[in-house]
Amino acid sequence: MRRIAMVVGLIVLSSPVVGAADDPKVAGACMTCHKEKSPGLYKQWFESEHAAHNVTCLSCHQAERGEADAFSHYDAIIATLVTPKDCGRCHPRPADEVGASYHATAGQILDSADAYLAHVAAGDPVAVLGCESCHGGKVEIDPKSPNRLARRSWPNSGIGRINPDGSLGSCNACHTRHGFSKAQARQPEACSKCHLGPDHPQKEVYEESKHGNTYYTNVDDMNLEADSWVVGVDYSEAPTCASCHMSATRTQGVTHDVGQRIAWTLRPPVSEHKESWQAKRANMQDVCTACHTRTFTDGHFHQFDASVRLYNEKFAEPATELMKIVRSKKLLENPASFSNKIEWTYWEIWHHEGRRARHGAAMMGPDYTWWHGFYDIAQHFYFKLLPEARELGDPDVDAYVDRILSSDPMHRWVREQTDDLKKQIRSGEMQRVYERFFEAGE
Amino acid sequence: MLRTYLDFIRAVAVDRLGRAGVILVTTSFITFVVMQAAILLGIVGNAYVGLIVYLLFPLLFVLGLALIPIAWMRRRRATGLTTRELLERRFGPDGVEADIAGSKVFRTVAVFTLANVLILGIASLMMLHFMDTAEFCGTACHSVMSPEWSTYQASPHARVACVECHVGEGVGALVNSKLNGAWQMVSAAFDLYERPIPTPVHQLRPARETCERCHWPEKFYGSRLISRVAFADDEASTPSYTTLNLKIDPGAAGAAGVHWHVDAGNQVRYASVRDERREMLWVEARQPDGSVRRWVNTRLTPDAGSGETGQRVMDCVDCHNRATHIYQRPDDAVDALIRLGAIDRSLPFIRREAVKALRGDYPSRDAAEAGIRAGLGAFYRRAYPDHLATWLDRIDAAADELVEVWARNVHPGMRVGWGAYPSFLGHRESPGCFRCHTRDLRDAEGGWISDDCTLCHSILAYGEAAPFAYLDPAVEGARNRPMHEYLRDEFLRSVEN
């Protein structure tokens, strides 16, 4: 019954609402010229489901005179920018979900540490290309520009783009124009436009994981073009990013609110559970059970949660506390944020390797958990952060560092003998130090 | 008569040099007459024969004539005798004795001189006439002119002589062309010319004097239907059709076609970057009512050379810059050969392989011939070994055609490769029409010259499976239905107008 309702819903959603400005002859003139002048664009559209359902240039690009980005183009009033509001005319539910998602807020980054760093350490063009390309920028109007969009802010297909019509986001961030293929958006490459690199290597973790492994081996059997794409039913070889975070399961519909299946936020220096995280964890486990038994998935989350808590307590909290002392006592040479070496060290510990470690643990990427993750954290913690803190020559800082290294059972090893430590590992005494991380979530 | 002549020339040839002169004059004259007869009778027709007959023999004739008096002067100096004594010695007192009509010798010399002037006059005229033939222009400077000569021979103007467009009428044009020709001889001899040779559009006779003698703008041209077939790179070399109804008539106001630009009363002027006629600095159109509109390029980069070096009034060659010396693109050339049946489309992937073979980098015609044959052969041997024996003739025939196309379009010695001389007609090989019909050029109000597709042509098929796809009503559910209906409607309306 539920599936029938979904199918009916899909059919309703995919019947385009033909607006008054949708004179097919005008759209015909658009196609004539653009087939010649931008043949690739035309061909993408021609092969698309949109073309098959009589969704033409004007269905998406029509605009009303008076709209901020509307301009006259031959016989039509159009806008270059197509926003979630435009897409929402035919796809209202995804547009609403996107609007409510964490993705939609990605453009409001001007006050984040990341944006601050790009502006001071690099410069504005880098903020445009390096930050706003993924996060989304504020699209500004320039009446002198042929399409009324300021060149500094357009093109931009960032996921949290701030549009002149007040909407947030860009469907094109994942649904690449002008084909808007389902298959394309379901593939991991759609997400790895942004989710990759030293600070959030989701793409790399996925490639390393068993999931990515089987996906790339069996991509031809993934049934990616199917209208219905329910994990375990319509395909069963492997999950993609979309499978776990967005796509339909036997009990959940597809959602464009990507946070609905994520229990932890692994983004900040110290990881936190998200609001109603138990329900979100249950949503994710529901996805997993399309292919795994409950015992299997329980085991995975048991291991994952333990490593997140370990990260928090062993490294993130002490490092954050240490920086708090340093900052509150104004021990740094230069006043501006990021103008002192130790700040970069701390930043990389949580923002780079700290996320690598946690994402690796979340998505079954052993190398990212350890060598690209905890290994780097440990090295920078013991041999950069702590020595750089000691160099400040402050008694409170020194006392804090000494306390960590001599009394914390997780850090005490630094001052012990190798033979003794090996004995502790063999006897299981060392492992017992970390037992509480496994037990905490039970 | 013959006797008198023989006696005379024997007497005139005073020594070995004189005899050489006499022999040169006599033999070159006889050969000239015989060769001329052979040409007239059609026995010989080689372009090089013309070069020898009209250039070499008259030259030898004059040289021989000059040797005779030189020999006389040498003789006079050697013997110390006076002219009269010498004449008496050679011709006897009889010959030198003057009566009322002069001496015998004088009369003979006068007759021969007249004859020589006549012969030289005729030869000079024939020489000038020969220099006006396309064979002379195309083959006298063989390697330099070979790209233009080979494309000219395959062109729509193959029966219009070079000089009709490149020299023009009148004594001034003749003198000018001979002076130019003299410099070209020096350039060719001392290797002073550019490779490839820049298109001489700037020195071309005004189109009003040349093109318009045959193609006058007042003629009603109507519209012109052109149909192109492009074959795909797939196994079947699947054809797709593009059919355009070109609106070429000068037209009345409101329904003007492409030749509006040269219609009486209209004048289009422009200035281009470095006067290359490619990127416009500004364009002006004067309408019959005397009003002028001006569009200025708003997208010129400062280093594009935006200094104005000359203005020009638009005429035929601003668009028809390759009206005769038409170079093809390799894909177009192959499409044309397949369409003509000269290349057999039943050979799988023949379109793709033929274009690939043509695009090969060959240093000479021999290398091209070997490379094209080897390229095609290798593909079919590898991909279709079982069919090779039965297809061999078709593959060979295709290779023959491709070699001809290559040789016509590619001239490594002159550094003329594919695309060296793009056509400004349309917008396939260069921006063409869009040089002016572009939103880069704006008038004071921000307006631009329309770049609407249907301004210059209706479109009856655009890469479709049928040549007149859009004449029929659109099929329900067709993906390009709006375009189909728009173009059908536009064509029907344009025909009604």
Image: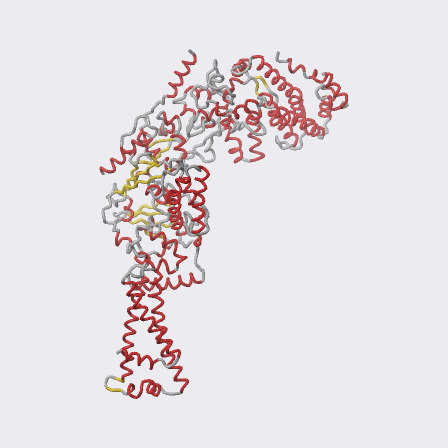
Q: Quadrant of the C terminus of chain B?
A: top left
Q: Is residue B100 left or right of residue B350?
A: left
**Residue B27 vertical position relative to residue A262 in the rendered view, above or below:** below
List x then y, in percent, for residue B444: 35, 43
Q: Is residue B296 left or right of residue A300?
A: left
Q: Quadrant of the N terminus of chain B?
A: bottom left
List x then y, in percent, for residue A289: 53, 14
Q: Nearer the viewer, residue A162 or A156?
A: A156
To which quarter of the image does residue B134 belong? bottom left
Q: Is residue A231 left or right of residue B207?
A: right
- Is any atom of residue A13 visible in this view? yes
Q: How many marks?
A: 0
Q: Nearer the viewer, residue A61 or B64?
A: B64
To which quarter of the image does residue B359 belong? top left
List x then y, in percent, for residue A110: 53, 28
**Colour mode of the rendering:** secondary structure
To which quarter of the image does residue B124 belong? bottom left
Q: Nearer the viewer, residue B286 or A434?
A: A434
List x then y, in percent, for residue A25: 30, 31
- Is any atom of residue B443 visible in this view? no
